[in-house]
Amino acid sequence: MPSPGLSRRRSPPRSPWRSRPSSSIRRSNAARDGIKEALEAAGFKDGANGFHFVFETAQGKPEIAAQIAKKYVGDGVTIIVPISTPSAQGAVAATKDIPIVFTAVTDPLAAQLVASLKKPGGNVTGISDMSPVAEHIALIKEITPNVKNLGVIYNPGETNSVVLVARLKEVAAPAGITVVESPATKSGEVKQAALALVGKVDAIYIPTDNTVVSALEAAVSVAEENKIPLYAGDTDSVPRGAIATIGFNYHDIGVDTGKVVARVLKGEKPGDIDVGVCDRNRPRSSTRGRPPRSASRFPTRC
């Protein structure tokens, strides 16, 4: 859950990196790169004319995200661009004055980032990436048509995950699927949460939960050992062991976000800019092995 900060400081700090980033970090990196690309296209090049792009990562920890946001406020950055719901919540809690343009946030209303998606007011706007959960259920039914009980591992402390699980239940019921919850409040609990589903479910679903995705391999090992198909909410989880998903291109989400950031840097007020919602009808598919028929229905751009 990284947060770029844009400022006029002469010597921006070095960004901390992990040698093998998780899929949540890779998504954030893709969004970050898209943001930088859009800003450069708008004339805001890192290192030119006193403009600096500062990037730091909280490595999936909300408390660190809050600390980074407070640091940015203390440094007097020009704008904060939090990537993920917890990072956005930390930024919004840290300042009511510095403009904030969030991205990759599941439900900005439920996360209490804005009061409205239309001209939200205040110092906050951004881009939402609500997962295409209905398409996920359709994909699960297509690949594993006999699924009756679907386990979901998530952190109930992440607002984005609570919203996604509620949506999952809403669309699963008409499909004849019962959702079985298994909470994991920290990455070290993911394996036990997966084990708790063994014998109770026909498949497992991992939403775009920062906590669980950071320890995805623990859930995958349990699923493979017990021959339970495991689906994910993001495309980067497929190379790590999930059998299939339909997700968004986060570089494209970053480009769209960067365009909003550029508008704010050029003088528009965040509160006058509608919150954007990534088009659910244009995600991309990712599967291990032969792609399902539904894969061809979705082009790659957000």
Image (cartoon, rainbow, N blue to C red):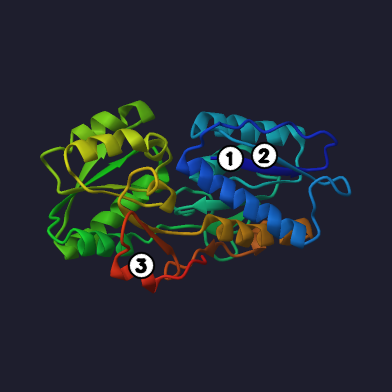
Q: Residue furthest bottom?
A: 297
Q: Are marks 1 and 2 in contact (CB under 8 Å)?
A: yes
Dot 3: element: helix
Residue hosting label 3 = 295
Q: Which of the two discs, 1 and 2, labels the residue nearer the N terminus? A: 1
Name the residue type under label 3: Ala
| Residue beneath the point at 67% across and 33% down | 15
Name the residue type under label 1: Pro
Q: Is residue 161 left or right of residue 52?
A: left
Q: CA distance from mark 3 to mark 1?
A: 30 Å
Q: Which of the two discs, 3 and 2, labels the residue nearer the N terminus? A: 2
Residue hosting label 2 = 55
> Quick check: can you spot residue 187?
yes
Dot 1: element: loop
Residue hosting label 1 = 2
On residue 146, which mark appears?
Answer: none
Q: Badge 3: how crowded within 10 Å, few (<14), some, or many (20+)?
A: some
Name the residue type under label 2: Phe
